[in-house]
Amino acid sequence: MKACVIHGARNLVVEDREVPIPAAHEVLLHLGAGGICGSDLHYYAEGGVGDFRLREPMILGHEGAGEVVGVGPAVTSVKTGDRVAVNPNHPCGVCSPCQTGRRNLCRNVRFFGSAARFPHVQGLFAEYFLAREENCHVIPAKISFRSAACAEPLAVALHALERAGPVLGRDVFVAGSGPIGVLIAAAARLAGAARICVTDLFPEPLAIARAMGATETIDIRANQEAVDAMIQRGGMFDVAFEASGHPAGLATAIEVAAPGATVVQVGMLPRGETAAPLNRLIARELRLVGTFRFGPEYERAVGMIVAQRLDPTPMLTHEFTFSSLSAAFAVAADKHQSMKVSLSPG
Ligand SMILES: [Zn+2]
Ligand SMILES: [Zn+2]
């Protein structure tokens, strides 16, 4: 079978691998569509993401949906022919974070396409891949594999909102109009936020943010004054999400946060230390919280997409097959033209 294997920065190739064989509780899936994520782009551009470095070849990909083509002998909840969205998060279930209901913080987690552990956990950008049966969520035929693959980034957004607390009637700021930023805007809209302001450096992703639920957007390159005005008024947002992964985004999120507000760091910042205007935390009694991946939000995200309460279509800008892998990653890295690029074996 074909698989998209990263060997290091700028070294991503389609290789032949053995089709895996499902163990008792495992399911063999044929990839319907995978979504290229910011972390996949970091592995491609830099050979790592955040503090995680590549130390051996790894199949990329953790956002995906596909068709069940085989099941292990103990599998009961899915059958051959089912279409499923696949949760890439495989917590151990026995460590203390798992035992206390924070499975996203599992100390022994296996997460598809991640170099956080060694040996690395292989991803799902392959013709066939294995998942545990409890990670497979059946989707109806009316939901495309491309939309279903968005359950993963939507789960990230839902968990970020969970970390922020209630947003009903509140004013929300989102720094960064990437897939996570626009899904936070969409989810905040559904959760009843009054005002949802999204910023970015480019106009194209901001148009998608408006289509997905932002009530206002600011192109920082063209209109830094609009952000400066918010800062000068002493901060005006009840919740500020940093979803760009840039230190400047964190500084802005802190500066626009109203007294008593919560600032949520969602984007993976560059490795090492990040400077930020932390005195604001004191004088405004801000809460600065982190958010990492997701727990039960994955299943909820699938439910929202299946119920068509949240339509990811505006963010699905491009699709490619494995035969155009380099082009897919080049387009995915160009934020002027793409938001979410889908990949399929072809
Ligand atoms: Zn992702
Ligand atoms: Zn665990």
Image: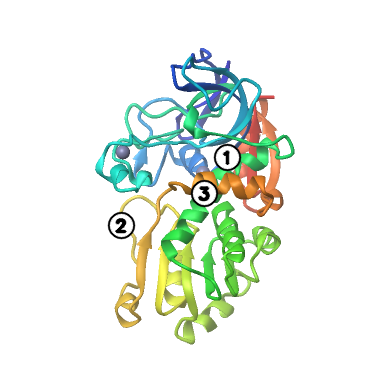
User: Which is nearer the N-term, disc 2 or disc 3?
Assistant: 3
Q: Which residue is mark 2?
A: 273
Q: Residue furthest front?
A: 76
The image's mark for residue 36 is 1
User: Which is nearer the N-term, disc 2 or disc 1?
Assistant: 1
Tag 1: Cα neighbours inside 10 Å, few (<14), some, or many (≥20)?
Answer: many
The residue shown at (58%, 56%) is: 183
Q: Which amino acid type corresponds to the residue marked 2 in the rendered image? A: Glu
Left of 100 or right of it: where is 324?
right
Instruction: Say which element carries label 3.
Output: helix
Q: Does label 2 point to a residue whose CB lies under 8 Å from ligand 1? A: no
Can you say which quadrant of the picture contains the C terminus?
A: top right
Q: Which amino acid type corresponds to the residue marked 1 in the rendered image? A: Ile
The residue shown at (51%, 12%) is: 18
Give the total of numbered labels.
3
Q: Which residue is mark 3?
A: 155
